[in-house]
C-alpha cells in the first residue's frame, strides 16, 4: 500500500479508501470531489519543488484508487458468451432487422457517369466542384458587380463565416481557367466539364429542389465561336437522348457570358407536336450558355484578345427527368425505395 507525505493527501486517501469499501458503485470513488479538490489545490501552488512533490503524490493516489477499483470490481459471471463467428440465427433473440439485400447506384450517379463518358469522347475532362465556397468564386470572379440584382437569382445557403453553398458549378470556372492557363500557352485548349451538387434557396415543388445537380462546361482556345458552342451541345444532347434533335437559341442575360443564350431543343417526346412534357410548346428550354465574358477570362489571367471560349450550365436532374419521364424532381432525394428500384 502506498504511503503519502502530505497530510492533506493522507487524509483524503484514508477517507476515499473507507468509502471504496462501502460504496456500491466502486467507480464513483474515482469521481469523488475530494480527489478533484486536490487537483484544484495543485493549480494554486507556486511552481517549484513543493508543487512537483504534491503533484506526484496526487497522481500516485489516483493510480492507487484506480488499481483498488479494478481489483474490487469483478466481471459479471452470469453473461452467456456470444460466438461472433456463428451464423446469424445461432445467438437467438436478435432485434428485428431489415432483410439483407444488395443496393444499387443512384440514378443521378449513373447518369453523371454516362454524361461524363459522352463528353470525354469529345475531349472534355471532368473536374469535381466543391460544396462550400467563397463570395469571390461564386460571384466576383464571374463578373457579378457588387450588389448587382443578378446575384438575387443565385440565393443560396450561407455559413456564419459568410461561406456559400454554391448555387452553380460556375463557382469552379476561375480555378479551372487559372490552373489550365499553361495548357493554352502550350497550344492545347481548355476543355472541362464540372458535374456536381448545387444549392438554391427555392420554394420546393415538382420542378424545384433546394439541392440538385448541375453540369458546367468550359471550352477555351484560339478561335472558339458560338457555332462551336451550338455544335458541342447539340452533339451531346443527341447522343444522350439517342435521337436527332433540332436546337435553337434565344438571347438571354448572364453576367459571366456575352453574348448569352437560352438553349432549347425540339421535344424528344412529341417531335414538336406538343405534349405534357414540353407543356404543349414542342420545345424545351434546357440550359443557359454563352461566350465567356472577356472580364472572366481577364480575371483568370487569360488574354481575351488571343483566346475566346464558351461555357454552359445545365441541370442534370432535369436531363434525367426527361430521359425517364420522372414527373417530380423531389423523388431523387426522397430515399423512396419504390422509386429507386426502378433504376436497378
Ligand atoms: Zn413534347
Image (cartoon, helix red, strand yellow):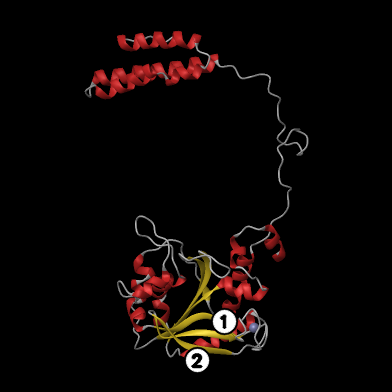
Left/right of residue 252 with respect to residue 37 in the rendered view: right
Left/right of residue 117 with respect to residue 90 in the rendered view: left
**Residue 60: x %, y % from top left:** 39, 17
Q: Is mark 2 within 8 Å of ligand 1?
A: no
Residue 165 picture quarter: bottom left
3D distance between C-alphas at marks 1 and 2: 16 Å
Residue 122, numbered label = 1
Residue at (72, 40) in percent of width and height: 96
Label 1 secondary element: loop
Asked if 184 appears above or below 126 in the picture, the reply is: below
Label 2 secondary element: helix
Residue 227, numbered label = 2
In front: mark 1 or mark 2? Answer: 2
Residue at (38, 9) in percent of width and height: 3
Q: Mark 2 or mark 1, which is nearer the start of the sequence?
A: 1
**Residue 144: x %, y % from top left:** 34, 75
Left/right of residue 82 with respect to residue 60 in the rendered view: right
Residue at (78, 34) in percent of width and height: 90
Count the numbered circles shown.
Answer: 2
Amino acid at each position: 500500500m502506498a504511503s503519502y507525505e502530505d497530510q492533506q493527501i493522507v487524509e483524503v486517501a484514508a477517507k476515499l479508501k473507507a468509502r471504496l469499501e462501502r460504496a456500491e458503485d466502486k467507480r464513483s470513488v474515482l469521481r469523488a470531489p475530494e480527489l478533484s479538490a486536490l487537483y484544484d489545490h495543485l493549480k494554486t501552488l507556486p511552481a517549484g519543488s513543493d508543487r512537483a512533490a504534491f503533484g506526484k503524490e496526487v497522481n500516485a493516489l489516483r493510480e492507487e484508487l484506480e488499481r483498488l477499483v479494478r481489483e474490487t470490481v469483478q466481471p459479471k459471471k452470469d453473461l452467456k458468451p456470444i460466438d461472433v463467428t456463428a451464423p446469424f440465427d445461432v445467438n437467438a433473440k436478435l432485434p428485428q432487422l431489415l432483410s439483407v439485400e444488395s443496393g444499387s447506384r443512384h440514378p443521378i450517379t449513373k447518369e453523371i457517369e454516362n454524361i461524363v463518358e459522352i463528353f470525354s469522347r469529345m475531349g472534355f475532362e471532368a473536374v469535381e466542384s466543391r460544396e462550400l465556397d467563397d463570395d469571390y468564386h461564386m460571384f466576383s470572379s464571374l463578373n457579378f458587380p457588387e450588389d448587382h440584382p443578378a446575384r438575387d437569382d443565385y440565393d443560396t445557403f450561407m455559413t456564419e463565416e459568410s461561406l456559400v453553398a454554391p448555387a452553380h458549378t460556375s463557382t469552379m470556372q476561375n480555378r479551372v481557367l487559372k490552373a489550365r492557363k499553361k495548357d493554352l500557352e502550350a497550344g492545347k485548349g481548355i476543355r472541362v466539364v464540372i458535374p456536381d451538387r448545387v444549392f438554391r434557396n427555392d420554394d420546393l415543388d415538382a420542378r424545384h429542389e433546394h439541392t440538385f445537380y448541375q453540369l458546367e462546361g468550359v471550352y477555351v482556345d484560339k478561335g472558339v465561336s458560338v457555332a462551336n458552342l451550338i455544335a458541342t451541345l447539340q452533339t451531346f444532347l443527341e447522343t444522350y437522348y439517342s435521337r436527332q434533335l433540332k436546337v435553337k437559341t434565344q438571347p438571354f442575360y448572364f453576367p459571366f457570358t456575352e453574348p448569352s443564350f437560352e438553349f432549347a431543343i425540339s421535344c424528344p417526346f412529341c417531335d414538336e407536336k406538343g405534349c405534357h412534357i414540353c407543356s404543349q410548346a414542342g420545345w424545351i428550354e434546357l440550359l443557359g450558355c454563352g461566350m465567356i465574358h472577356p472580364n472572366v477570362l481577364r480575371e483568370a489571367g487569360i488574354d481575351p484578345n488571343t483566346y475566346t471560349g464558351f461555357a454552359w450550365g445545365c441541370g442534370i436532374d432535369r436531363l434525367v427527368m426527361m430521359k425517364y419521364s420522372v414527373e417530380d424532381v423531389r423523388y431523387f432525394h426522397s430515399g423512396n425505395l419504390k422509386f429507386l428500384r426502378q433504376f436497378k
